[in-house]
Image (tube, grey):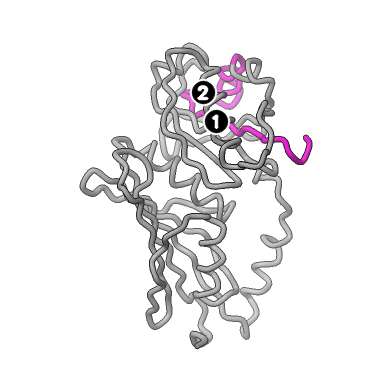
């Protein structure tokens, strides 16, 4: 894949008895996009009888002067390829990625039997799951050093969605820009909004530096001023105007998790 190529990652959640059946259900989709399975996993802990299959495929779009435009077009072009019955939903775009969630099992059934939903991502720079892992390997060693203070990163993603599954997929897509190992800790239902809470792992930086780094990776503008507590820092973002569907707000918190004393630099 050339440096200016965009890569599609299509993750399908499908009802299946085992991995072999899940892969077989996706055979038509794989042939359609000329892709290959890069990951398959049992997600029955979250949804009984379900498997997730992630397919990597090339996109006909290439990086141009407008990276965001190319990413969004790659997602929309793929969705249109699925047929007239599949409505193109709102596409979220924050380079180096753009994504959308197809949450209509009836429309997906013809192409992927048993499909519950589909997460479609376009990436500039390749599959995030194949990024170098040196930082992940080194992190525990630094955490174990008594002289090093470290913090825990938490993310809350508020999503205007009717279904928990759709909210979780959008939250995971946002979290993947900061951490490849983010995990959902809880989902809280509010007034027409589902708040998805995620643990993004640890950082050896101070809370302030950790949040500045995370905000840069998320790419949104108009973040609030950082609010500092005794051992934490928090920053927030809200969509303006507030959309009827999709991500409406983000909140990122970095909390000191070590026993050593941390002092916020002036």
Circle 1 is placed at which residue position? 75
Circle 2 is placed at which residue position? 79
**What is the number of callouts on the image?**
2
Q: Residue furthest right?
A: 2
Assign a secondary structure to mark 1.
helix
Q: CA distance from mark 1 to mark 2?
A: 6 Å
| Mark 2 nearby-residue class (10 Å; few <14, some 14–19, many ≥20) | some
Residue 4 x %, y %: 73, 39
Please tell me which residue is depicted at 68% across the width and 24% down the height of the picture.
35
In the image, residue 6 lies in the stretch drawn in magenta: yes
Front-most of 124 and 173? Answer: 124
Please tell me which residue is depicted at 53% across the width and 68% down the height of the picture.
212
In the image, residue 39 lies in the stretch drawn in magenta: no
Please tell me which residue is depicted at 53% across the width and 32% down the height of the picture.
120
Residue 10 x %, y %: 57, 30
Residue 117 lies in quadrant: top left
The magenta stretch is: 1-28
From the image, which quarter does the N terminus lie in?
top right
Residue 54 x %, y %: 59, 32
Q: Residue furthest left?
A: 191
Question: What's the mark number on residue 212?
Answer: none
Front-most of 54 and 234? Answer: 234
Please tell me which residue is depicted at 51% across the width and 30% down the height of the picture.
51
Residue 119 sits above or below residue 107 on the image:
below
Q: Is residue 14 left or right of residue 29?
A: left
Assign a secondary structure to mark 2.
helix
Residue 251 lies in quadrant: bottom left
Would you say the residues marked 1 and 2 are in contact, meaning their CB atoms lie under 8 Å apart?
yes
């Amino acid at each position: 894949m050339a440096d200016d190529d965009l890569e599609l990652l299509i993750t399908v959640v499908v009802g299946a008895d085992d991995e072999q059946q899940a892969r077989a259900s996706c055979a038509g989709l794989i042939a359609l996009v000329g892709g290959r399975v890069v990951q398959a996993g049992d997600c029955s802990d979250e949804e009984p009888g379900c498997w997730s299959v992630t397919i990597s495929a090339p996109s006909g779009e290439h990086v141009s002067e407008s990276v965001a435009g190319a990413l969004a077009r790659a997602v929309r072009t793929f969705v249109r390829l699925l047929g007239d019955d599949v409505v193109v939903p709102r596409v979220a775009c924050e380079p180096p990625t753009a994504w959308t969630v197809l949450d209509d099992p009836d429309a997906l059934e013809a192409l992927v039997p048993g499909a519950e939903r589909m997460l479609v991502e376009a990436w500039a720079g390749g599959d995030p799951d194949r990024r170098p892992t040196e930082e992940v390997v080194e992190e525990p060693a630094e955490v174990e050093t008594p002289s090093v203070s470290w913090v825990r990163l938490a993310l809350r993603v508020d999503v205007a969605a009717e279904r928990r599954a759709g909210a979780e997929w959008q939250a995971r897509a946002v979290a993947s820009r900061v951490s490849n190992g983010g995990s959902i800790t809880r989902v809280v239902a509010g007034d027409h909004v589902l708040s998805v809470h995620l643990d993004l792992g640890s950082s050896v930086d101070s809370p302030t530096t950790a949040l500045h780094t995370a905000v840069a990776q998320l790419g949104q503008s108009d973040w609030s001023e950082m609010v500092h507590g005794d051992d934490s820092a928090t920053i927030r973002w809200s969509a303006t105007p507030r959309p009827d569907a999709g991500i409406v707000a983000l909140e990122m918190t970095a909390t000191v998790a070590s026993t050593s004393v941390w002092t916020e630099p002036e």
